[in-house]
Image (cartoon, helix red, strand yellow):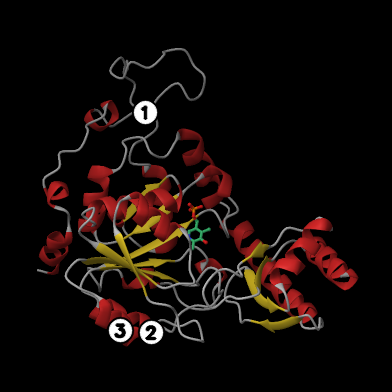
């Protein structure tokens, strides 16, 4: 019954769209001992002369195992950016619908809204960088299709209160997208375990941060089977390339190594925070539930330039709402962090 509600949120053209049917959709078993002359590929071996699996079955099977979901609740994309773009295309009618974002937050939501000619309603976070639940639920209208909650949030580094997120999932009339790009660094639970409970919940994750694979571009969308089936119809047929699928699978088979790196980054984060506390020109260090630290300094533009001159590139977030004079520091290796502290001491 709830799925009918989600169906009503879809764009009219998407409800009835017929997907492209690729050669590998029509005959799926690429490993079979068959002569494949159906896709106009070059028959000579290059290791990648064949089209990749359009459904990325092996990667999904491994992810499903790790995350405790079904493969039919997973869609993979060319980075989270492609996944997020598909959500706009599925749910937001250009020049008619709107999405809600909570600045300061990840810049791609606005870029994708502009790209898709979809209005943005911005409701700033409160002074604790938490969502203003009542205000968000008050400004939504019948055309509000997506609400983006980035938790842990970039660039503020905090996770949102679970109660507030749940109130939003229950009270929002469209789809709530929780962007969990940094969830592997978080002390809080992922919302992934709740996707069966809420038909209007989408969780996105990525291999770009904790998994150390930003270069291969693999974004992940978890949602109900219904939502995933719709996204599957509109994604480009071969959107995740062969090399990416292989590399992702290798990495997902060495979870222990990933977990060690996460532990090391979290340890370094606390070292970094305690060191940053010693500088008088650093005014506030905000609590971090992620692999970066947001800090308010005396003059962000000036400190940013000073650091660049000494060979260290941080992110200057001073132009973002609520982030005046804030710099964002990604937690690096132990040596990188020591070098940063040494250089800060020279300023
Ligand atoms: C880094 C980041 C991503 C990752 O995007 P990819 O396209 O998967 O690399 C997504 N969301 C947020 C908030 C991020 O900071």
Which residue bears the numbered disc 2? 132
Q: Earlier in the sequence, mark 2 or mark 3?
A: 2
Which residue bears the numbered disc 3? 167
Q: Secondary structure at mark 3?
A: helix
> Quick check: 111 left or right of 34?
right
Q: Mark 1 Cα within 10 Å, few/some/many (few <14, many 20+)?
A: few
Q: Are marks 2 and 3 in contact (CB under 8 Å)?
A: no
Q: Secondary structure at mark 1?
A: loop
Q: Earlier in the sequence, mark 3 or mark 1?
A: 1
Q: Quadrant of residue 304?
A: bottom right
Q: Residue at x 70, y 71 (%)?
A: 300
Look at discs 3 and 1 and give the one toward the viewer.
Answer: 3
Q: Quadrant of residue 222?
A: bottom left
* Quadrant placement of the C terminus: bottom right
> Quick check: 274 left or right of 192?
right
Residue 196: in sight, yes or no?
yes
Q: Is residue 68 above or below residue 248?
A: below
Q: CA distance from mark 2 to mark 3?
A: 11 Å
* Quadrant placement of the N terminus: bottom left
Which residue bears the numbered disc 1? 31
Picture coordinates of residue 244 (x, y %)?
Answer: 50, 40
Residue toward you, 346 or 43:
346
């Amino acid at each position: 019954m709830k799925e009918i509600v989600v169906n009503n949120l879809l764009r009219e053209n998407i409800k009835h769209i017929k997907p492209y049917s690729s050669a590998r959709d029509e005959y799926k078993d690429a490993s079979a001992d068959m002569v494949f002359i159906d896709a106009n590929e070059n028959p000579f071996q290059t290791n990648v002369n064949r089209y990749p699996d359009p459904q990325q079955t092996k990667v999904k099977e491994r992810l499903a195992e790790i995350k405790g979901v079904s493969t039919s609740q997973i869609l993979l994309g060319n980075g989270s950016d492609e996944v997020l773009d598909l959500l706009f295309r599925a749910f937001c009618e250009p020049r008619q619908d709107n999405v809600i974002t909570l600045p300061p937050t990840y810049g791609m939501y606005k870029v994708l809204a502009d790209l898709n000619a979809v209005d943005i309603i911005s409701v700033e976070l409160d002074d604790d960088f938490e969502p203003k639940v009542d205000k968000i639920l008050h400004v939504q209208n019948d055309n509000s299709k997506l609400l983006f909650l980035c938790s842990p949030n970039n660039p503020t580094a905090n996770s949102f209160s679970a109660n507030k997120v749940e109130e939003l999932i229950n009270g929002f009339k469209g789809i709530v997208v929780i962007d969990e790009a940094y969830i592997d660094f978080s002390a809080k639970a992922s919302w992934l375990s709740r996707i069966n409970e809420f038909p209007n919940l989408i969780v996105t994750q990525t291999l770009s941060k904790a998994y150390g694979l930003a270069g291969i571009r693999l974004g992940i969308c978890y949602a109900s089977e219904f939502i995933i089936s719709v996204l599957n119809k509109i994604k480009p047929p071969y959107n995740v390339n062969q090399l990416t699928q292989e590399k992702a699978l290798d990495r997902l088979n060495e979870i222990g190594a990933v977990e060690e790196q996460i532990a090391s980054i979290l340890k370094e984060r606390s070292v970094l925070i305690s060191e940053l506390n010693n500088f008088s020109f650093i005014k506030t260090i905000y609590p971090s539930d992620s692999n970066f630290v947001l800090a308010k300094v005396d003059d962000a533009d000036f400190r940013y330039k000073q650091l660049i001159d000494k060979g260290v590139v941080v992110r200057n977030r001073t132009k973002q709402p609520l982030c005046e004079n804030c710099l964002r520091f990604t937690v690096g290796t132990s040596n990188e962090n020591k070098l940063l502290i040494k250089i800060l001491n020279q300023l």
